[in-house]
Image (cartoon, grey):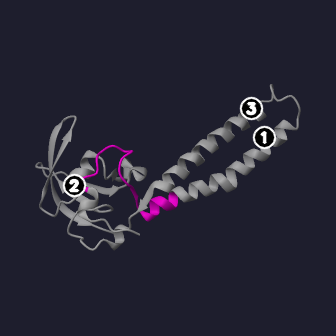
Amino acid sequence: MTELEPDDVDDDPPDRAAGPNYVTPAGKARFEAEHTALLRGERPRVTREVADAAAQGDRSENAEYIYGKRRLREIDRRLHFLEKRLQSMVVVDPAVQRRRDTVYFGATVTVQDHAGATKRWTIVGQDEIDLASGHISIRSPVGSALIGKQIDDEARIVTPGGVRTYCIVEIAYP
């Protein structure tokens, strides 16, 4: 596991293809679990189904065979994608972060706007984004604006609706 220092993430360009692909241990585990399920479960099952359908004769009008081959191509594309992402991942465990007074990768940050409304975001890698649960990318405008900030610092975020300013009120790590 890696611990990030401020210089490791502050200068990352927002381009998703550039720079390291940071991920939490849980995020990598999810990718590995999906890869294993596809490779050892789904793909062998679909392969058997395609072989059974092919044994029935005319393949040109055999819907099970045609659908099975299509499904195999989808599985292989997903496996290729997962393998590429897993190769580029840099696992960062936020639980070992020593400087817990500053926002780094893996921090859960509570912010407050000038009207007093609060929001809570957890800074994660681009493969772990889940807006419904407040997980935002370290490379997003919000994520990059929060990195390196401390409690009572202000973060200015440029949005399509204009510039928003938030005050950091809490920083937590797992």
Instruction: Give the residue at x 37% y 54%.
Output: 20
Magenta includes 15? Answer: yes
Magenta region, residue range: 10-30
**What residue does disc 1 label?**
50
Distance of mark 2 from mark 1, alpha carbons? 50 Å
Distance of mark 1 from mark 3, alpha carbons? 8 Å
7 relative to 163 in the view: left or right: right
Q: Is residue 56 above or below residue 34?
A: above
Q: Position of residue 6 (x, y in %)?
A: 23, 62
Query: Tag 3: residue type?
Result: Ile
Please tell me which residue lies in front, 162 or 47: 47
- Quadrant placement of the C terminus: bottom left
Total numbered badges shown on the rendered structure:
3
Neighbours of disc 3 within 10 Å: few (<14), some (14-19), many (20+): some
Please tell me which residue lies in front, 91 or 94: 91
**What residue does disc 3 label?**
66
Q: Secondary structure at mark 1?
A: helix
Mark 2 or mark 1: whose residue is earlier in sequence = 1
Q: Is residue 125 above or below residue 160?
A: below
Q: Secondary structure at mark 3?
A: helix
Based on the displayed image, in which of its 4 quarters is residue 37 positioned? Answer: bottom right
Q: Residue furthest top?
A: 61
Instruction: Give the residue at x 71% y 34%.
Output: 67
Q: Position of residue 23 (x, y in %)?
A: 41, 58
Q: Is residue 151 above or below residue 129?
A: below
91 relative to 8 in the view: left or right: right
11 relative to 19 in the view: left or right: left
Mark 2 or mark 3: whose residue is earlier in sequence = 3
**What residue does disc 2 label?**
146
